[in-house]
Image (cartoon, helix red, strand yellow):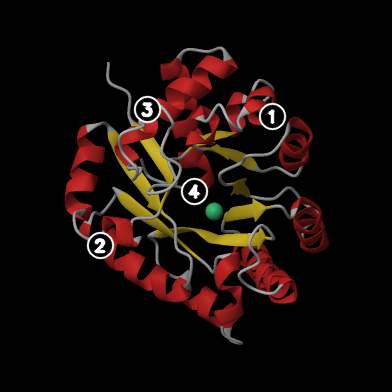
């Protein structure tokens, strides 16, 4: 019996895929990755991403939102813009949105206000959040707590934190997105400890392609969705369960959270 994977985080509109996106997608589909959720990092990108979903119905879905790096270019009408673009059925989550103090490409104040706008829209529409957080754990939690006092529908995408941070997210109702970060022995120790306590009904898997190529694939630089099984295998090993069982749970969780028909 074959296993079908859902990659909940890919960046298909990245420059790295400009030349051969269709081949990349064919390779993914041929590797049993049958559903991909493309990540948008601006409203403009969400619109381009919608075009992509039309070319691959029921195979590609998308998020819509403004990445914290782009917060400084978000318009004053962001809330209205978001609500409008979210009318499309192929948009299954709000994001990626959040806080990134690692590189601070946008000023912190602007990141905070743009992030809160996304949270308000999520609260009003009931759509799940696709959340990004780097070096900003405390402010991130404070923003979520400020807007929500009920369990939050969403995923902490590309989770790279420790057990305590993971438990805080789980308590808030969030799912945890695991990438090829877990394959990187230079920096995966905390994450490995954490996933041993990650409940199966909260796990999601993603490649974050073209980023975060699993370290075992040393020859290639660009990550592709076809490599998702490598992430799944390593994660299953660390969670001490059969890979097929993990993949099936991650699939069910994806369908549940994003309301896919898959
Ligand atoms: Zn991200």
Q: Which residue is mark 3?
A: 229
What is the secondary structure assignment of the residue under circle 3? helix
Specify the label residue 258 is tagged with: 4
First of labels 2, 1 by sequence position: 2
Q: Measure the alpha-carbon separation of dots 3 and 2.
A: 26 Å
Work out how far the residue at label 1 is from the one at label 4, CA to CA, in angstroms. Answer: 28 Å
Q: Can see residue 248?
A: no
Q: Which quadrant of the view contains residue 172?
A: top right
Is residue 132 among the parts visible in the rendering? Answer: yes
> Which of the pair 155/23 is nearer the observer?
23
Residue at 27% from the left image edge and 62% from the top image edge = 52
Is the C-beta of the residue carrying label 3 under 8 Å from the nearest atom of ligand 1? Answer: no
Please name the residue that numbered disc 2 is placed on.
54
From the image, state whether disc 3 or disc 1 is nearer to you.
Answer: 1
Q: Which residue: 60% across, 66% down?
A: 68
Tag shown at residue 233: none
């Amino acid at each position: 019996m074959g296993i079908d994977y859902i990659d909940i985080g890919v960046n298909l509109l990245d420059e790295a895929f400009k030349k051969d996106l269709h081949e990349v997608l064919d390779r993914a589909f041929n590797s049993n990755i049958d559903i991909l959720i493309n990540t948008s990092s601006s409203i403009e990108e969400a619109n381009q991403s919608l075009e992509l979903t039309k070319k691959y119905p029921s195979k590609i879905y998308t998020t819509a939102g403004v990445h914290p790096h782009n917060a400084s270019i978000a318009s004053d009408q962001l809330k209205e813009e978001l609500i409008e673009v979210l009318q499309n059925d192929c948009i299954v989550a709000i994001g990626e949105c959040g806080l990134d103090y690692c590189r601070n490409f946008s000023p912190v104040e602007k990141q905070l206000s743009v992030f809160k706008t996304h949270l308000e829209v999520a609260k009003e529409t009931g759509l799940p959040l696709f959340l990004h957080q780097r070096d900003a754990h405390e402010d991130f939690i404070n923003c979520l707590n400020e807007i929500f006092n009920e369990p939050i529908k969403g995923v902490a995408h590309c989770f790279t934190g420790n057990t305590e941070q993971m438990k805080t997210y789980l308590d808030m109702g969030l799912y945890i997105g695991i990438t090829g970060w877990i394959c990187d022995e230079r920096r995966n120790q905390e994450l490995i400890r954490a996933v041993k306590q990650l409940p199966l009904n909260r796990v999601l898997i993603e490649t974050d392609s073209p980023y975060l190529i699993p370290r075992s694939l040393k020859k290639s630089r660009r990550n592709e969705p076809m490599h998702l099984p490598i992430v799944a295998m390593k994660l299953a090993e660390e969670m001490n369960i059969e890979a097929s069982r993990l993949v099936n749970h991650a699939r069910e969780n994806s369908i549940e959270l994003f309301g896919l028909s898959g």
